[in-house]
Amino acid sequence: MSKRSRKGGEENPLSDIEQLAADLPSANGEVYAKIAMTGGSSFRGHLVLKRLAELPHVREIHVFDIKAPLVHAPKVIFHRVDLTRDGADDLVASLLIKNEIKCLVHGALFSGPGRNSSLRREIETIGTFHILNALAEAKVERCVVLGDTFVYGAHSQNPNFISENHSLRALGPDFVRARVDVEKQLIEFAKDYTDCEVCVLRFAPILGPNSTNVRARYFLVGIIPKVLGYDPLLQFIHEDDAAVAAQLAIFSKARGAFNIVGKGVLPLSTGIHLSGRFPVPVATPICKTVFSLGFMLRVWDLPSAMVPFFQYLCVADGNRAEKVLGFRPHYSSRQALKALIEAARLRSVGFSIPSSALGEEQPLKPNEGFVRVN
Amino acid sequence: MSKLKSQTTNDSQTGSQKNLKEHEDLVSLSSNVFKVRRTLLDQFSRIERDMEKRSKMNREQFASREELNSVMEKLSAFRGELDSVLLKIEERIQHSAESFRIPTMEAAEISPAGGEGSLDEIVTGLNPFNLRRKYHEFSLSMRSEEVDAFGFDPIFDRFVRPVFEFLYTKYWRVETYGISNIPKSGPCLMVGNHSGSLPYDATMLKMAVLKEHTAHREVRFMVEDFLFHFPFLGSMMNRFGGVRASQENAQQLLQAQMPVVVFPEGVKGLGKLYRDKYHLARFGRGGFIRLCLRTGAPLIPVAFIGPEEIHPMMARETFFAGMLGIPYVPITPTFPWLGPAGLIPLPSKWFIHILPPIDLSEYGPEAEKDRVLVYRLAQRVKNQIQEVIVEQLKNRRSIWFG
C-alpha cells in the first residue's frame, strides 16, 4: 500500500496549501521557546505536555485549563481559565500578549462522547470560538489543534481511506456534528487571518498502556457490545506516536489538516478476540436501544451515537502527514491495541508498564521496563 | 509457609532479628518475582510458538522473516536475563537459608520445574469450563491478527478456499480461456458482465486467477453497496478480497498494483430477470474507463457464460425488500418456496472468457475529461463483451453440460 490516491478536491481550504507546505521541510519551522496550551489536563494534552516539557529549548509552557495538569515541571505554568465563560477570550489574549507567546496548542477537545454532552458541546464549540478570538487579538503566529478522525463520521459511503480533502458533513451523532462545527470555525479563521498558521491534527483513537478514552474503555469492560453481522476495520494510533506527531507539527511550518494514524488496520472482531472479553452481538433494529440502555445502566460508556462506528468504516489516510510533516508511525494499530490490553493484564497482576517500554527512541533494558505499582 | 519457616528458625536459631527480617523480605520478593515470571513466560512462550508456526508456514505477509527473527532474539535475550536475575536471587536465598541452617525446601519448591509448566498446560487444556478462552483461541486461529489495508485476511481466505475450490472444479466445472491475458505483475482492471444475485462470478474469477494463472495473483473485486453493508455477508466478502465499489477504492487498489474486478452494470446486472439473460444492462457512466485513463492500467474485458442461470429470477419483489432495506427480493423457481434451501445456486456449466487487454494509456490521463471519448470507449467495451457472449451462446448446446 505504498502509494495511495488523494482526491484533488477544492472544497476544503485547510488542505489547499499542501503544495506550499510540501516545499518546506518540517524541520525549518520556528523553534518556539514559549508555548501556550489549552486542555493540558486531558489525556492527550498530558501526552503533548509531557513531551514538550522534556525539550530543552522550550522554556515556558502556559496551560489554560479548569484543572491543573498532572505534569509537574518548573516550565509548566498553569492559568485557571474556563473557556466556556464570557470574557475567556480577553483573559487568554491578555495572558498571551503579556507573556509574548507566539504558538498555541488547542487541545481542549474531547476524544469521544461522554456523559455530559452539553458541557462537551459548549467547551468544543464555544471554547474554540473564544480561543480563535484570543488568537486574532494576540496575533499568535501558529496554532496547532488536536482533533480526531471521527469528524469524517462513520458513513456507509466512506471510502476505505479518507483523505484530508474529504468534505466534512454535519451529519450523524451529536459529537461528530459539534466537531464539524469546530473545524468549520477553524477553516473560516484560517481564511480570514492568513498570518496565523493553522494546523489541524486529526488523530485516530489513541490507545496505549495509559490511555483511558472511550475506545480504550470499550476493550477493557467485561461485556463488549457489537453490532450483529458487522465487522468494520478499525484504526488506532499508539500514544507515543501521537506525542511525536504533535511535537513535529508544533515545530513545523505546515498548514492545513493532517490525519495522524497508525500503520495498518484490524477488524473489530479480531480486537475483541485479542482483548479476551465477552462480546455481546446486538441485532441492528434494537441496537440503539440496547446501547443506550447499557449506557444508562453504566454497563459500558458507549452512547447509542457510537453505533455507526461499529457498523461502517472510519479509517483515514495518513500519507499527507508522512509527506509534509515527516511523521512515520512506529507502531501499528494492532500493536497499539495490544499495548493497551497487555498493560491492563499486567496491571491486574500488580505491575504497570510505562508507555515507552516497548521502546523506540531510548530503548530501556528489558528488566527496566517494569515498574512496581503501589 | 514463610511464617512457619520463621518459627522454626526462631526455635533453632536465636540469630539477629535484622537478618531474619531481611530473609523474610527476600522470600516474599522472590515469590512475587516468580509469580510475575510465570505470567511473563506464559506470554512469551505463546508468542514464540505463534511466531514459529507463522515463520514455518510462511503465512505472515506483513512482517519479513528478519523482523520475526529479531523479535525472537529479543524475547530469548529477555528470557535469559530474567533467568539470570532469578538465579542470583535463588543463590541469595540459599545462602541466607544456609546461614540460618534450615533445609532449602522452599528454594527447591520455587525453582522452575519444566514438568510443572507442561502439566499446568495440560490441565488448563482439559478444563471444560474456560469456554470463553477457548472460544477466543478458536476464533483467532481462523484469522490473521492484522488484515491488509483493504480488509483481505490471508488466513481466513485459506480457510474458506476449499468451498470455492469445490464450486470451481466440481459444481460449476468452470472453464477459463485466455488467462494469460492477465499481466504477471502490475495493475489491471477486469470488466465483466454481472449476474446471479450474489457476486459468485467475481469469486470464480478470483479462483481462476489464483489457480490457473502462472503468477497465482490475488484479485480484488468490487462489491455493490447493499451487499457490502448486508450483515455477515459484507464483512465476510471483505475478508476474502471484496471491497466496497467506489471510484476512490478502485483507484487506490490500482495504484497499489493489484488486479481489480469491476462490474459496471452494478445492481442492474445482479437483479437481471431470466428473460433478459445475457443482455448487458447499461454500463454505468463509464467510470471504469476514467479509472483506466487516470491510472494507466490496462483494461481487460471478461465474458462470463453460465452465472445467469444459477438463480433464474422470475420476478423482483420490492415491497418487503423496501422494509428490509435492500433493493429487491429475488423470486426464483426455488427461493421463497423452499426456504433457505432455495438459496443454493443451480449447477450450470460456466465458461469464463478473458479477452486481450485494451491499452488506454495512449490517450493520456487528460482524456478522462473528454465525455464523448469516455462514453464511446465504454460502449465499445460493452459491445465487445456482448459479441463474445452471443458467439459462445451459439456454440453452447446445454445449460448444464456446456
Image: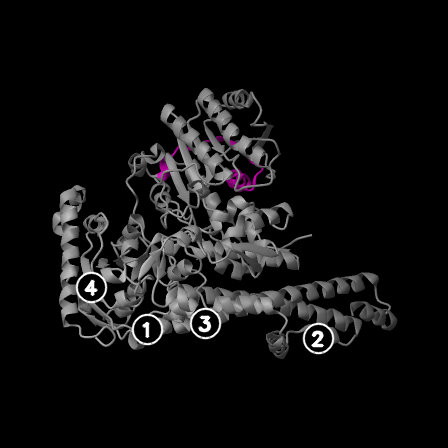
Q: Position of residue B312 (x, y in %)?
A: 30, 65
- The Cα–Cα distance between marks 4 and 2, rounded to whole angstroms, is 73 Å
Amino acid residing under circle 4: Ala
Asked whether the viewer can see residue A38, the reply is no
As drawn, the label of residue B303 is: 4
Count the numbered circles shown: 4
Q: Is residue A145 left or right of residue B399?
A: right
Q: Residue at x 70, y 63 (%)?
A: B29
Tell me which numbered mark, 4 or 2, is placed earlier along the sequence.
2
Badge 2 vs badge 1, beta-carbon distance below 8 Å = no
Q: Looking at this view, is A192 or B18 the one in front?
A: A192
Q: Residues within 10 Å of mark 1 (few under 14, many from 20)?
A: some
Q: Secondary structure at mark 3?
A: helix
Q: Position of residue B352 (x, y in %)?
A: 22, 68
- The Cα–Cα distance between marks 3 and 2, rounded to whole angstroms, is 31 Å
Tell me which numbered mark, 3 or 1, is placed earlier along the sequence.
3
Q: Residue at x 52, y 62 (%)?
A: A273
Q: Is residue B267 left or right of residue B147?
A: left
In the picture of the structure, the residue carrying the numbered disc 2 is: B109
Q: Residue at x 27, y 72 (%)?
A: B348
Chain identifier of the residue bearing label 2 in the image = B
Badge 4 vs badge 2, beta-carbon distance below 8 Å = no
Tell me which numbered mark, 3 or 4, is placed earlier along the sequence.
3
As drawn, the label of residue B167 is: 1
What span is in magenta?
A: A26-55
- The Cα–Cα distance between marks 4 and 1, rounded to whole angstroms, is 19 Å
Badge 3 vs badge 1, beta-carbon distance below 8 Å = no
- The Cα–Cα distance between marks 2 and 1, rounded to whole angstroms, is 59 Å
**On the same chain: label 4 and label 2?**
yes
Asked whether the viewer can see residue B352, the reply is yes
Q: Looking at this view, is A132 or A226 the one in front?
A: A226
Q: Nearer the viewer, mark 4 or mark 2?
A: 4
